[in-house]
Image (cartoon, helix red, strand yellow):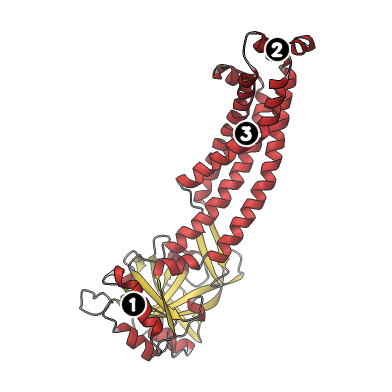
Amino acid sequence: MIPANYTIRNIVKHKITSALTVLGVSLVVFVFAGSMMLTNGLKKTLVSTGADNNVIVIRKAAQTEVQSIIGYEQAKIISAAPEIAKGADGNPLFTNEVYVLISLAKRKSDEKANIVARGVTPKSLELRPNIKITAGRMWEDAGSEIIAGKLAAERFVGCGLGEKVRFGSREWTVVGIFDAQGSGFDSEIWGDVVQLSDAFRRPVYSSLTFRMADTTQFEALKTRLENDRRLPVEAKREKVYYAEQSRTIITFLNITGIVISVVFSLAAIVGAMITMYAAVANRTKEIGTLRSLGFGRFSILTSFLFESVTISFLGGVLGLVIAYFLRFLRISTTNWDTFSELTFNFGISWNIAIWAIIFSLLMGIIGGFLPAVRAARLKIVDSLRSA
């Protein structure tokens, strides 16, 4: 076999063409990894919104909380379920919530966007211990006071600490900012469920959330609740529910990312192919010399193919390094399932890095195969004569 350092020397020797191919591959890998990081960041934000041992109940056939209606009597029946865990005060870890979409102006563009106003109870925070108030205080039940997620406070007019915002025929004062550790709740504003229900004249709840005392009993509880004729509801694990909220937009982003990556990769493959064909044409005498020294056709083929793969690998690493810095960017988009504004970061993972490198290697193999075959098929005499 031809030594690997021969390939490395040839890459360095033809540094301009090699560098251009590396840059082309890196651009494709950047787009490929970026699209995967985008969907991964969105998925992580929504999935982290739910807890493993929490259950959310919405009306049967409702896809989201915004479509769900649960009556007070139905909520009382469900809150008495023996499978619900008890809190430190001996009461069920159970909350009934109201979910309303309101339209507010963004700080930077002054454009209107939907944001979630969620009516909650004190148990809502107990069910989500990762949520902490980082500035200000909790609201008072009797007043028109609310708290805002840190991303909502940053992006929307009137949602900062001490600011006032008007919705539901009432003016509300933001008395606290909470951090939901990167979950979807960071993009919401919260208030007392009674106050928000009165403001929006909603004598019903949107959803019920509770913690299971024993998560292995979920299927039995789900079956009993959904078969109770008094309760036209559907129970889901909270993580599953929030994962489903991203299904439409993630599918769209995945398809878009694949299409763009395929189009760009075709250009990169052609670039790699041109580079390797040029290498074969410029090194015809070298190929003849190598053959005359006893290196077989297979050795020539693997050497040129290795060179193409090495160039693509370098491009893949460069593209991945550039894509890594996307994790510091924050994206805001409308969740098409809930019609609300959602803010999240690009999310990198080892899985994405591995697939990006594999993608770059495939481009190198495809782009370098035909030129490598051409080099291997050159005859010794013809190669030496052409020089």
- Label 3: state its secondary structure: helix
Q: Residues within 10 Å of mark 3 (few under 14, many from 20)?
A: many
Mark 3 is on which residue type?
Ile
x then y, percent, for residue 143:
37, 84
Quadrant containing the C terminus in the rendered view: top right
Q: Quick one: 119 or 236, which is closer to the camera?
A: 236
Query: Which of disc 3 and disc 2 is earlier in sequence?
Result: 2
Q: Is residue 53 visible?
A: yes
Reply above or below: 1 against 58: above
Mark 2 and mark 3: span between their CA atoms? 23 Å
Image x and y of residue 367, in percent: 67, 34
Question: In the rendered structure, which disc, 2 or 1, sits on the residue that comes first in sequence?
Answer: 1
Asked whether residue 107 appears in the rendered view, the answer is: no
The Cα atoms of the two marked residues, 3 and 1, are separated by 53 Å
Which residue lies under the disc numbered 3?
A: 365
Q: Which mark is residue 221?
A: 1
Image position of 233 (left or right of 340) = left
Q: In terms of depth relative to the viewer, which is nearer, 299 or 12? A: 299
Give the label on residue 99, or none. Answer: none
Q: At 65% across and 27% down in the image, what residue appears? A: 18
Residue 315 higher or lower than 190, as above or below: above
The numbered mark at residue 288 is 2
Quadrant of res 215: bottom left
